[in-house]
Image (cartoon, helix red, strand yellow):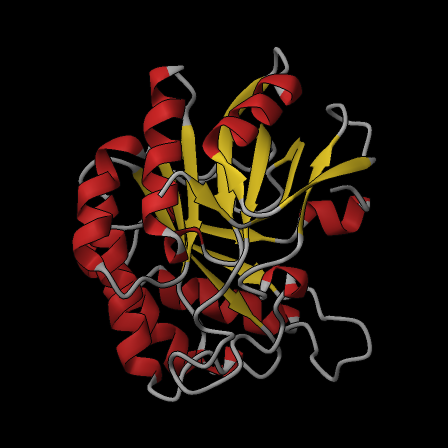
Amino acid sequence: MSQGYIKEIFSSFQGEGASVEGSCYGLRQIFIRFAGCPLSQGLLGTKGCRWCDSPEAKANQPKQCLIEEKAGLQSFGGINNPVTVENILEAIRNLTTNDLHSISFTGGEPLHQPEFLEKLLILLKKENYKIYLETAYTEDIDFLKRIIHLIDFACVDVKDRSAEASLNWEMLVEREIKMCEILKNNAKVFAKTVISKSSRKEDFEVIAKLCGRIGVPIVIQIVTPPAKSNILQPTWEQIIELSGIASEYLPPDKIGISVQMHKFLDIL
């Protein structure tokens, strides 16, 4: 399929991650935000993450794709969805700057539109762009295996139980860790786990142990609570404790703490 649904395209700096292998934290990227999130649409029995930071990308078929008019301008024009791969390539070329590091595929969920994603990846790799994939879930593991040679960096959002992204949390985490393991065959990959005050150390230890088993770094990301929510950030004591738990399964250079830099700076 050469057409797909994209919520927005813009140039900014990667605001998530830490100084672990696979992270592009602080590097200039062009962000392609895919529309549609299977977790928010009830695939695993819930409405997705309680603290989703991109609720506008949940819809499968938004009417318009917003495109930043010039890199750093933070003002947008728009074209009608579905868009073509050529539409996206034109936008990327227009937003490419000398300090561009990579193209970030985020969402929503990029793997929710597999054929469209694959066509776009192939064209971008032909033009020597580096690819950063941010993902949380796919039903099609075989598809992920097919495209790993096209991905340079990857962040797999391994959900904490308190995110309430699935009625079967253990199954979801196992799938996400399997995705890490597959991506590791070609990409520099890390797991990101968003934590809040309601996160439990026993649940985090499950994730840390699985990451240690396959040798994938883990980033502990402090939640940015949505407006008018009762979600609280973790305490300092929690952060220290969780980092200590991670150190039982991973070396220090594979453990990091992250906040959403772009949220604090109020940039795209």
State the image coordinates of residue 124 (x, y, percent, origin top left). 40, 24
Left-right relation of 116 to 184: right
State the image coordinates of residue 20 (x, y, percent, origin top left). 42, 41
Give the residue at x 21% y 51%: 143
Left-right relation of 173 to 261: left
Choose between 215 and 37: the one closer to the eye.
37
State the image coordinates of residue 192 (x, y, percent, origin top left). 45, 57
Q: Is residue 114 above or below residue 102?
A: below
Q: Is residue 232 above or below residue 88?
A: below
Give the residue at x 65% y 73%: 235
State the image coordinates of residue 185 (x, y, percent, origin top left). 17, 40
Q: Is residue 81 above or below residue 172?
A: above
Residue 217 appears anywhere in the view: no
Q: Quadrant of the C terminus?
A: top right
Residue 55 appears anywhere in the view: yes
Left-right relation of 115 to 215: right
